[in-house]
Image (cartoon, helix red, strand yellow):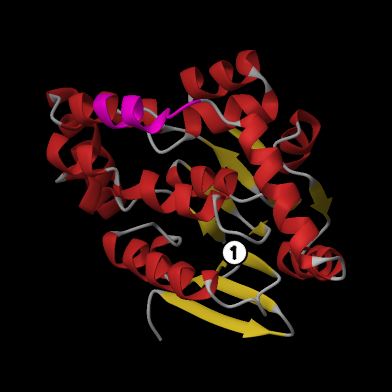
Amino acid sequence: MGVLNASIDGGLGHLEINRPEVRNAINRELLDALHETLDAWRERDEVRAVVVSGAGGKAFASGADIAELKARTHREAFFGLNQALFQKLEDFPRPTLAAIDGFALGGGLELALACDLRVASRAAKLGLPEVSLGLFPGAGGTWRLPRVVGLGRAKELVFTGRLIGADEAFALGLVERLVDDDARAAAFALAREIAQHSPLAVQVAKVSLNAHARPAAPDGLDRLAQGLLFDSPDKHARMAAFLEKRRK
């Protein structure tokens, strides 16, 4: 088993992040696997919708792998590793759904925001805590989150870095469906409902909705800002403290 379990069944694709030992933290190997799978599935018309989930039941994705992220400099930021993957997910020609059981933090929440729809269980915890590590949500969080919950609420969540429960996330409009348990099953049920309709009509509707909703080329600014923070002493000190606390 690799870092990503990818399967297609009955016209529905399933991308399961398979790093439960680190709460499905996003590393370079996972990004590469997601890129490869999305590229392959893009050409397969039988894929009518895609559900993204996390293995283990405790996390959708807990964010970037801090041990790997700590070593990144402005050079990696300018490559926009996470940004490129999340944009590819947003532009995927068929609907994508995030099934959030457990934590969706930092880059994990940005991954969910790049999906078209989010389904969460009541056990879910969501947040963008990057400021506590000397960074900011530079993979789309500062512009995808405001278009979902509004600018003021987005600023409050980003500036404080606080985590919110599923009930608050649903009230804010951050998740579209809230279920008592098993977000994955609910996400697949919604995906099957969508897949019953005309594939071309749904695809055109997605393109139109995204075109009207998105700002013009925001990712370049994100890469520039994150590049400056990646080399900052404060970022290195905060991430070293985080890793030391985790080892204890």
Q: Does the magenta-highlighted stretch encompass residue 185?
A: no
- Residue holding disc 1: 52
Percent position (x, y) of residue 85?
41, 53
Q: Is residue 122 above or below residue 164?
A: below
Residue drawn 12% across the image and 25% down it: 233
Camera-side residue of 209 and 229: 209
Q: Note whether 187 is above or below 216 in the view shown.
A: below
Quick one: 185 or 211, which is closer to the camera? Answer: 211
What kind of residue is marked 1?
Val
Along the horizontal axis of the image, is 184 left or right of 56? right
In the image, residue 221 lies in the stretch drawn in magenta: yes
Q: Where residue 48 appears, x then y in whole percent?
A: 71, 71
Judging from the image, what secondary structure is the residue with disc 1 in?
strand
Placement of 231 over or under 18, stated as above or below: above
- Which residue appears at 61% of the width and 74% of the height? 14
Q: Is residue 100 visible?
A: no
Give, as a single range, the part of the protein colored magenta: 216-224
